[in-house]
């Protein structure tokens, strides 16, 4: 895309050819099957980066990995970058909200309920608040209380729930993903122009 924006048509053509070659080899080397085991990260990244031939099958695999993990998130930093977007962009906004807000499983809500006001480095399922942990657990949990790499959830809120989609520096689209689970959203955008 950047080559097209820059007017570099020859480079754009070459990049498209190269990306088609990568996609073809990826699909030959790693054929999708509901009978194989995948991680949530593998499935959502393959969809997000449009590297699979059968997007519907890849989405079915992602949904299967979520179900097999008892409807709990199970990814690291790299998966976090694409997971929420893939769910929202493929009509699973309610599932995304459910996974974020569960009381009884690892979720963003769970760490907030444990006293967090920032994003911890680790999602650990405590039976108490983080501030009342025994010292042996506290040492493991206190690696960092402010890890922005889990922050892509903020982009999810802005882009999908509030619907503010920045197409380029001069153009916005407002297209919220509606959900019965969300009763009210308030969001503002300040443009420098």
Image (cartoon, grey):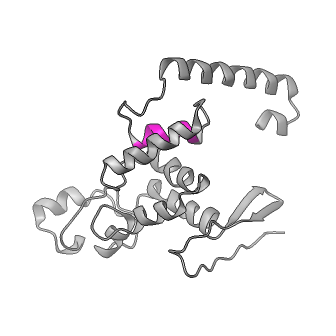
Q: Can residue 75 be seen here?
A: no
Nearer to us in this view, 193 or 122: 122
Residue 118 % position (x, y): 40, 68
Q: Main secondary structure of the magenta part?
A: helix
* Rendered-image quadrant of the C terminus: bottom right
Taking the spot 59% from the left edge, 52% from the top edge, the residue there is 90
Residue 5 as seen in the image, left or right of residue 48: right
Q: Quadrant of residue 171?
A: bottom right
* Rendered-image quadrant of the N terminus: top right
Nearer to us in this view, 30 or 162: 30
Image vertical order of residue 13 relative to residue 188, above or below: above
Taking the spot 45% from the left edge, 37% from the top edge, the residue there is 42
Residue 51 % position (x, y): 59, 31
Residue 5 % position (x, y): 84, 40
Residue 163 % position (x, y): 67, 67
Q: Is residue 41 magenta?
A: yes
Report the span colored magenta.
40-47
Nearer to us in this view, 11 or 62: 62
Taking the spot 31% from the left edge, 75% from the top edge, the residue there is 113
Residue 117 as seen in the image, left or right of residue 187: left
């Amino acid at each position: 895309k950047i080559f097209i924006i820059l007017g570099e048509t020859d480079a754009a053509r070459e990049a498209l050819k190269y990306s088609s070659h990568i996609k073809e080899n990826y699909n030959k080397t790693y054929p999708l099957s509901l009978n194989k085991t995948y991680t949530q990260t593998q499935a959502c990244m393959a969809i997000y980066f449009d590297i699979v031939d059968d997007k519907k099958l890849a989405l079915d695999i992602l949904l299967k990995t979520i179900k097999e993990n008892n409807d709990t998130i199970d990814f690291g930093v790299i998966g976090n970058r694409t997971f929420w977007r893939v769910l929202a962009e493929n009509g699973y906004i309610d599932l995304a909200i459910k996974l974020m807000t569960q009381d009884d499983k690892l979720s963003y809500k769970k760490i907030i309920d444990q006293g967090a006001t920032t994003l911890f480095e680790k999602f650990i399922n405590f039976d108490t608040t983080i501030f009342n942990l025994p010292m042996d657990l506290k040492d493991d949990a206190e690696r960092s209380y402010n890890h922005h790499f889990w922050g892509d959830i903020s982009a999810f809120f802005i882009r999908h729930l509030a619907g503010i989609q920045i197409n380029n520096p001069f153009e916005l689209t407002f297209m919220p993903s509606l959900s019965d689970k969300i009763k009210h959203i308030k969001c503002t955008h300040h443009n420098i122009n």
